[in-house]
Image (tube, helix red, strand yellow):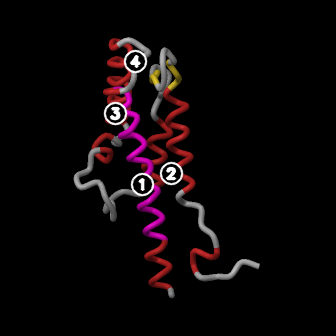
Amino acid sequence: MLKLSVHKLDNVRCDAIRTLLDGIRNLLNQLLEGPAGCDGLCKAQDLGVLLRQLKAYDILSATFLVPSRSPFIGLRYHSLKDAVDRVSMTHIATTWGDDICLDGRYFLGIIRQQAGACLELKPSDFGFSVS
């Protein structure tokens, strides 16, 4: 039972890391290939600022791990999340619809929430009944 619990916990960790990295990759792709709205210069500037921030906090190399799948040896979820929390999104605006530029902090917040949701455990995850 203990071995199964450790395996389950590692799967939870890997899901959270994967969700965080996939979200960052999707945000980068949105800036590279997203729909029209902000002009190309705005997107290029935002992409450059985001890439510099990711590199400064040592997130960029983790974002493009090959292969990008578990067990994510050497990565700790909380260290990665803390680094993402430090990314300054004050100059980042992303386009997610026609002529709507939104603050990138909003999208990083969603990414963090989705990753954090992967860490929620229930007693039933470990074979305990819930009364």
Q: Main secondary structure of the magenta part?
A: helix
Q: What amino acid type should be assigned to the residue bearing mark 4?
A: Ala
* Dot placed on the residue nearer the N-terminal end, 1 or 2: 1
State yes or no: residue 26 in magenta.
yes
Q: Residue at x 37, y 19 (%)?
A: 43
The extreme right residue here reads 131
Name the residue beneath numbered marker 3.
Answer: 29
Q: What amino acid type should be assigned to the residue bearing mark 1?
A: Ile
The extreme left residue here reads 66
Name the residue beneath numbered marker 2.
Answer: 115
**How far is the residue under mark 3 from the one under mark 1?**
18 Å
Indicate the secondary structure of the residue bearing disc 4: loop
Q: Residue at x 47, y 56 (%)?
A: 16
For the C terminus, the image quarter is: bottom right
Q: Which residues are magenta?
A: 9-31
**How far is the residue under mark 1 from the one under mark 4?**
30 Å
Name the residue beneath numbered marker 1.
Answer: 17
**How far is the residue under mark 4 from the one under mark 3?**
13 Å
Q: What amino acid type should be assigned to the residue bearing mark 3?
A: Asn
x, y percent for residue 10: 43, 69
Quarter where residue 13 is shown: bottom left
Name the residue beneath numbered marker 4.
Answer: 36
Circle 2 residues within 10 Å: few <14, some 14–19, many ≥20: many
Circle 4 residues within 10 Å: few <14, some 14–19, many ≥20: some
x, y percent for residue 68: 29, 54
Q: Nearer the viewer, mark 1 or mark 4?
A: 4
x, y percent for residue 69: 31, 59
Tell me whether circle 1 and circle 2 mark residues in contact (CB < 8 Å). Answer: yes
* Dot placed on the residue nearer the N-terminal end, 4 or 2: 4
x, y percent for residue 105: 52, 30
State yes or no: residue 13 in magenta.
yes
Quarter where residue 72 is shown: bottom left
